């Protein structure tokens, strides 16, 4: 979902021209696998779990006319390379935002 959400937000915020090249880097090999054009689910459970997410990804790509490349970046490598540094920053930002969202949700439940 993070890949789809990131792609959606980038398209909405930047409005790239059709045929713009977008590079999506992730440390999640499964995400790279399921969003690849030649993904074939190995089990019925995969279709149920990932089918709607995969379809949303491809619909964003189709509707925006983007050329998307998916690349793997090894996770949890600190700042050894520029790629690793960006991945580490994204992990930290994601954790921070998830904690804040959970706090907001808990506070909302406490006030109800």
Image: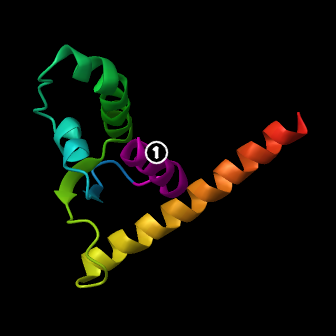
Mark 1, secondary structure of its residue: helix
Residue at figure coordinates x 42%, y 67% from the top left: 90
- Give the answer, above or below, for where 59 lies relative to 1: above
Q: Give left or right: position of 3 versus 26.
A: right
Residue 72 occupies which quadrant of the picture? bottom left
Q: Give left or right: position of 73 versus 11.
A: left
Residue 27 position in % (x across, y down): 25, 58
Q: Is residue 22 magenta?
A: no
- The overriding secondary structure of the stretch rendered in magenta is helix
Residue 70 position in % (x across, y down): 20, 53
Of 1 and 78, the residue lying toward us: 78
Q: Which residues are magenta?
A: 1-16
Residue at figure coordinates x 15%, y 24% from the top left: 41
Residue at figure coordinates x 21%, y 65% from the top left: 73
Q: Furthest residue to the bottom? A: 80
Q: Quadrant of the N terminus?
A: top left
Of 59 and 76, the residue lying toward us: 76
Residue 10 position in % (x across, y down): 46, 54
Residue at figure coordinates x 19%, y 49% from the top left: 29
The residue that label 1 is drawn on is: 5
Residue 86 position in % (x across, y down): 35, 74
Of 64 and 100, the residue lying toward us: 100
Q: Give left or right: position of 9 versus 86.
A: right
- Give the answer, above or below, for where 22 lies relative to 32: below
Q: Furthest residue to the front? A: 110
Q: Give left or right: position of 53 versus 15.
A: left
């Amino acid at each position: 979902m993070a890949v789809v959400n990131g792609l959606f937000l980038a398209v909405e915020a930047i409005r790239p021209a059709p045929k713009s090249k977008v590079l999506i880097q992730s440390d999640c090999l499964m995400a790279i696998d399921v969003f690849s054009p030649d993904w074939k689910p190995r089990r019925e459970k995969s279709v149920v779990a990932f089918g709607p997410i995969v379809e949303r990804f491809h619909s964003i790509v189709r509707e925006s006319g983007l050329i998307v490349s998916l690349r793997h970046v090894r996770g949890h490598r600190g700042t050894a390379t520029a790629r690793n540094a960006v991945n580490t920053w994204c992990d930290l930002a994601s954790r921070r935002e998830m904690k804040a969202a959970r706090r907001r949700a808990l506070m909302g439940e406490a006030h109800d």
